[in-house]
Amino acid sequence: MNTVGFMDYLSDSSRMNPLFRRLNNDEYRSREYLTWEEMKILIKAAGERGRHRVRDPALLLLSFRHGLRPGEAATMKWDAVMLERKVIYIKRLKGSQSGNHPMQQDEVDLLGQLKRIYANSYFVFPNERGKSLSVDGIEKIVKRAAEKAGLQIKVHPHMFRHSCGYFLAEQNRSTRDIQSYLGHKQIQNTVRYTAENPRRFEHFDWQWEQPF
């Protein structure tokens, strides 16, 4: 068997040696999202160190609030932001549906500061040269914030999108609304958030006489 054939053999998941197989994310972590309380701790930590004490917390806050993928946050430009109207146009990647989202006042305030600080950049979240952040750059920002926050869960940037979905599900938003908000073309991608929401079972009546 030649080298190429051997690698093809290994790539067959039915025969792959476990030592060569990359584990799924859920095998590394017990959950793939952060709670709102954890997000607040992380956002606060992002603003407590380094030169970018406005950019970094704004990046994390908007990524959570609007369910942004790292690439969507990295390429966001100021022409998508309408501060006076408190509206932001979310340009989705991976074939997802783009659309306008409302902004909360804390987002408007942070973005107003950002626009003054990085007045010469087209990008909302620029790097040192005023160009767009890379996905690797965002990962480093998140890693530093997580270390500062001391969270007991390994954090990565794509968790913010999942955190948004689970947060909306806990607010009892409909699956259709969450689908539209996150830009999912297929509702099957959204069902995970409502299916794992424990509040669905809060109406269960366990008020029987305790046997112990």
Image (cartoon, grey):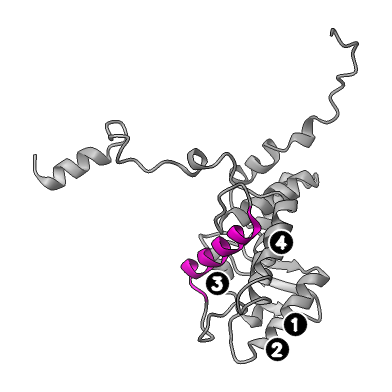
Mark closest to the chain's N terminus, 4 or 2: 4
Q: Tell me which label, 4 or 1, sits earlier in the chain.
A: 4
Distance in Å between CA atoms under marks 4 and 1: 17 Å
Gap in Å between the C-alphas at discs 3 and 2?
19 Å
- 3 or 4: tag closer to the N-terminus: 4
Q: Earlier in the sequence, mark 3 or mark 2?
A: 3
Residue 184 shown in magenta: no
| Snapshot quadrant of residue 2 | top left
Which residue is label 4 attached to?
65
Q: How far from the left and from the top, in percent, is residue 142?
A: 57, 62
Name the amino acid type tagged 1: Gly
Left or right of 178: which side holds 22?
A: left
Q: Secondary structure at mark 2?
A: helix
Q: Are marks 4 and 2 in contact (CB under 8 Å)?
A: no
Span of residues in magenta: 133-150
The x and y percentages for residue 38 are 70, 52
Where residue 9 appears, as percent x and y from the top left, is: 21, 38
The residue under label 2 is which amino acid type? Arg
- Going by the numbered disc 3, the residue's amino acid type is Ala
- Callout 4: few (<14), some (14-19), or many (20+) C-alpha neighbours within 10 Å? many
Residue 191 screen position, x and y as percent = 65, 41
At x 75%, y 52%, the residue is 37
Quadrant location, the N terminus: top left
- Marks 1/2 in contact by CB < 8 Å: the verdict is yes
Q: Quadrant of residue 105?
A: bottom right
Q: Is residue 106 left or right of residue 153?
A: right
Q: Residues within 10 Å of mark 3 (few under 14, many from 20)?
A: many
Q: Which residue is mark 2?
A: 116
